[in-house]
Every structure is written in structure tokens, then in C-alpha cells.
Image (cartoon, coloured by chain):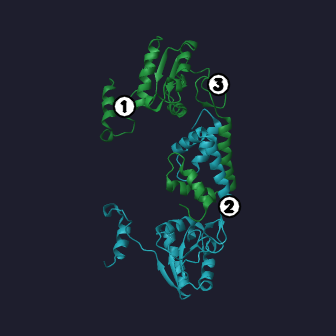
Chain colours: A cyan, B green
Amino acid sequence: MISQSSSLENLRQRLALLPGVGPKMAERLAFHILRAPEHEVQSLILAVEETRRQVIYCPICFTYTEETPCRICSDEARKNGVLCVVENPPDVDAIEKSKAFHGRYHVLHGALSPLDGVGPQELKVAELLRRIPAEDIHEVIISTDPTLSGETTATYLAEKLHTMGVRVTRIGYGLPMGGDIEYTDELTLSRALEGRREI
Amino acid sequence: MISQSSSLENLRQRLALLPGVGPKMAERLAFHILRAPEHEVQSLILAVEETRRQVIYCPICFTYTEETPCRICSDEARKNGVLCVVENPPDVDAIEKSKAFHGRYHVLHGALSPLDGVGPQELKVAELLRRIPAEDIHEVIISTDPTLSGETTATYLAEKLHTMGVRVTRIGYGLPMGGDIEYTDELTLSRALEGRREI
């Protein structure tokens, strides 16, 4: 608690609500914001407000964008016929950074989690299924997270997509690059062994 | 980089300028701010603006405050005659949390660092020296950081204060509570041994 100023303490509490910001970090940020030059603080506030005003969902793939459709959906050079299905918009950025995928994306906005009340209706599943014939898709790469809900979603989508006669693949499992076998958990190791390839 | 939206990428870059916020954390915060409810974002912006408008320096001890003088300086129950000298306002909060000090504070706003051009004139040193006779101070506890510049400041202040006939003490060095001797650096251990007490 910052006892000498209630507005500073209020700011600290607000900052502590942000993801990954603990009490000490919130205190450090609050003191920094108090001491920072005025233009720096105003630029940050402006960036927050502009982002919230300008960023929308792409009506085709549902990633974040400022254009309709997004840059990837409107890029003619992108390989047609292959869709990469992800849970959330940041996943699109992560895969784009790898430069290993040249098709288009589809963002589900979550993963199936019946216990939390997240069924197919809560996700962009119907929108995905409509894209298959409309865009003449022949392969769907399911890149949901390797978690219980990500796996459940992958299984559910694979079943639906198979009936539409489309090739369904799952992103590979295995050791992360730069990782250390000694410190890798047993589930990852067993998946990595299953996913071994000829060299 | 967030490639699909320039305003989101701009927000990410602004957030990455904050202390302790790395590139991944900045991305996570940017996506959180984009998705957060409007009232949450507005409360945060308001807290930033209020803090910067309302928080001032206490004219006596130079900590952050919204009142003149600050709550500690105006608290009659505080023990008169003892001053705790710290480098920065967050140090006041840290010591207050310990509930181990009942006197008043003096915030230097930094520590001596000749190589960085920080001399006594850049700090609230003259203001400290004026308080000694004015407030009839008999002990000054120097609680600057146990770093090179904190030590330099402590030595410099001790010299000045001794000539004024005031008792000067330095906050104790030693093992942090909950620490582990095995993992404590040798300098801390040697200071801890020097600072040993009869039990």
C-alpha cells in the first residue's frame, strides 16, 4: 500500500488488475507514471484510446484489424485453399512471425470448454464451416493450443470438417527449439517421440 | 510486432517503454487493454491523470503527498527528534510497512553519484541540514541503499551531520529474513558477520 497519497494508491490498485502485474510491479509502475514526462504519459493514453477506437474484427477471419477485410485476407499473394485455425488473434501474430505459413487464418475466439459454458455457438465455428465451400478450402491446419480445451476443440472440428471432405491436420507436437530434454515434461517427451521423423 | 494493426503495435511499443515491461509482457498488456471493458480502461486513465494532478512533494520531508504538509509530517503522534533519511519516496512506504520506525522522514530524491553529475546540490541535502536545528533533531538514521552511491551519500551526510553534534546511525546490514545462507553473496555475508549481535 502507498500510504502517503490516496490517488497514487488508487493508481497502484488499478495497475495491479492488469494481467501479469503483481503488487510490487504495480507500485513501481505507479511511481514511474507519476515521475514520467507529460508527453510520455499523454502518448500512452492516446495509444490506448486510438487502439480501442480503431481496432475491429476482420469480418472474414475474425482477427484484429483496422481494415476491412484484414491485410492477410485481402492479400492476393496468400495461398488460397489452406486455412490455419487458431484460438485467439495473438496466435495469428505468433504464426506470422515464424514465416512458415502462407495461407489464411481463422480465429475461433476461444476453445471449447463445456464446464465454463463455452460451446461451439460461443466460438466462430459456424463461420469457419461456411468458409470451406465458399473459399474452396482443401486443407485446414488446426493450431489450437496443446491444452485440454485446445485438444477438445481440435477433435470436435476434425469430426465436422471430415464430413465436408476436407483434409484436416494438427500442428506438430514436440520439443521446443532451444529446450533441454532433461527439463522437458514427460507428456511433451512422449508426444515428441510419437512425432519423430526420418532424417 | 503486432502486424495486423498499427495502433495496437503503437500501443505495444509505448507499453514496452514502462520499467520492467518486456516485449512479450507489452504484447499481453496491449491485447488485454484492447479487450477490457470500457469502464476498466477509463478508470485506469482517470487514475493516471488524477495522480499526476494531485500528487505533490511535501515541503518539509519531500515525499509524495496530496496534503501540505504530508500525513507523516503533520502527525503529532510521531516521535520528534529522529529523522530517517531515504533516497526516494517509495522507500518511505517500504519502511512504513515495517512499522518499525516512528519518527519522521527526509527524502533526498536520489543519491550522490559524481560520475552521473549528481552532487549534493541535486539532492535535498541543504533542506535536511536546515531541519536539524529547526526541528531539534538529535538522531539521523541514514537509510540510503546499500549500493556504491548509497554508501557514498551516507558517508558524506555523516560527516556533515557530525559537525552539527547530532547522532548519526546507518540502517543495519545483514541477511534478509527468509534468505538462505547458501545462496547469499559473500559481501552480504561479510557485512552480516560484522553486524553480529549477542543473543
Q: Is residue B198 above or below residue A88?
A: above
Residue type, numbered disc 1: Gly
Disc assigned to residue A54: 2
Disc assigned to residue B174: 1
Q: In this view, does B99 lie above or below A135?
A: above
- The chain under label 2 reads A
Residue A2 falls in which quadrant of the image? top right
Residue A7 falls in which quadrant of the image? top right
Mark 3 element type = loop
Q: In this view, does A34 lie above or below A43?
A: above
Disc assigned to residue B69: 3
- Measuring from the top left, give residue B120's x and y in whole percent: 50, 23
- Measuring from the top left, give residue A11's x and y in whole percent: 62, 43
Mark 2 element type = helix
- Measuring from the top left, give residue A79's x and y in whole percent: 53, 79
Q: Can residue B167 be seen in this view?
A: no
Q: Earlier in the sequence, mark 1 or mark 3?
A: 3
What is the spatial separation of the Cα atoms under label 2 and label 3, in whole angstroms?
Answer: 45 Å
Residue type, numbered disc 2: Gln
Please tell me which residue is depicted at 68% across the width and 37% down the height of the picture: B53
Q: Which of A84 and B168 is in front in this view?
A: A84
- The chain under label 3 reads B
Q: In this view, does A10 lie above or below A79?
A: above
Q: Nearer the viewer, residue A46 or A161?
A: A46
